[in-house]
Amino acid sequence: MKAALGVALLVAACGPPSSRPAIALPPPAHPELEPELFVRFTDRMGGSFALLRVSFTLDGRPVFDRSCGEVDDACRAGMKRTVDVLHARGAPGTHTLAARVDLRGEGAGVFSYIRAYHFRIDSTHAVAVERGRRTLVDATAWESGGPTAPLEQRPAMAWNDRFDDL
């Protein structure tokens, strides 16, 4: 049976798109602290896609959910390109992160029909959380396949783990 990680902080950020900032990590007060897990989401989808919703679960429990309505252009414009999703301390072991990203096609003029298309990225990732270590997970939505790939084959998720000693 998996031990649960305690969720310490949830951030649903809104604001203008920004470049990819580093997660500001507080220095550990005591080296014997339980392991830490930081998760960051970055939207690197191109202009052919509008981000509608981003949600994450950790071991099946919801930890982050940010959405904008179909017609709420101001909300979508305000969603940051990079958001800190989770900061948790807790049990070492392997945990499962799941991400869901809902997108809509974005086009104008003769390509306005693309706005009727909807896309979803469902992705899971096993992450090892170790005692005495800080685990940083970057989840990035990106376009795979290049400009000649069909739109429905472009949305993809990449996961990158980094580890720091406490």
Image (cartoon, helix red, strand yellow):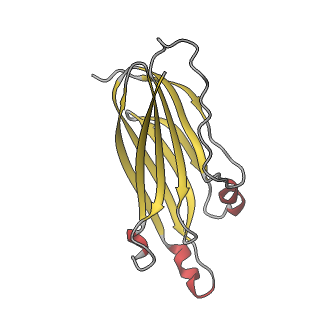
Image-based side of 77 in relation to 93, left or right: right
Vertical order, 121 against 146 (above or below): above
Residue under the image location 53 percent in, 34 percent down: 86
Q: Residue at x 50, y 26 (%)?
A: 88
* Farthest bottom residue in view: 110
Q: Which residue is drawn at 55% across and 39% down?
A: 85
Give the farthest residue toward the left.
1
Relative height, residue 129 to residue 119 (above, below)? above
Residue 164 place in picture, x, y as percent: 46, 29
Would residue 86 be found to the left or right of residue 153 on screen? right
Residue at image point 43% right, 59% down: 120
* Location of the N terminus (image quadrant): top left
Give the quarter of the image for residue 115.
bottom right
Which of the two residues, 165 or 68, is positioned nearer the viewer here?
Answer: 165
Residue 40 lies, in percent from the top left, at 53, 42
Q: Position of residue 116 (x, y in %)?
A: 52, 74
Left or right relative to 116: residue 18: right
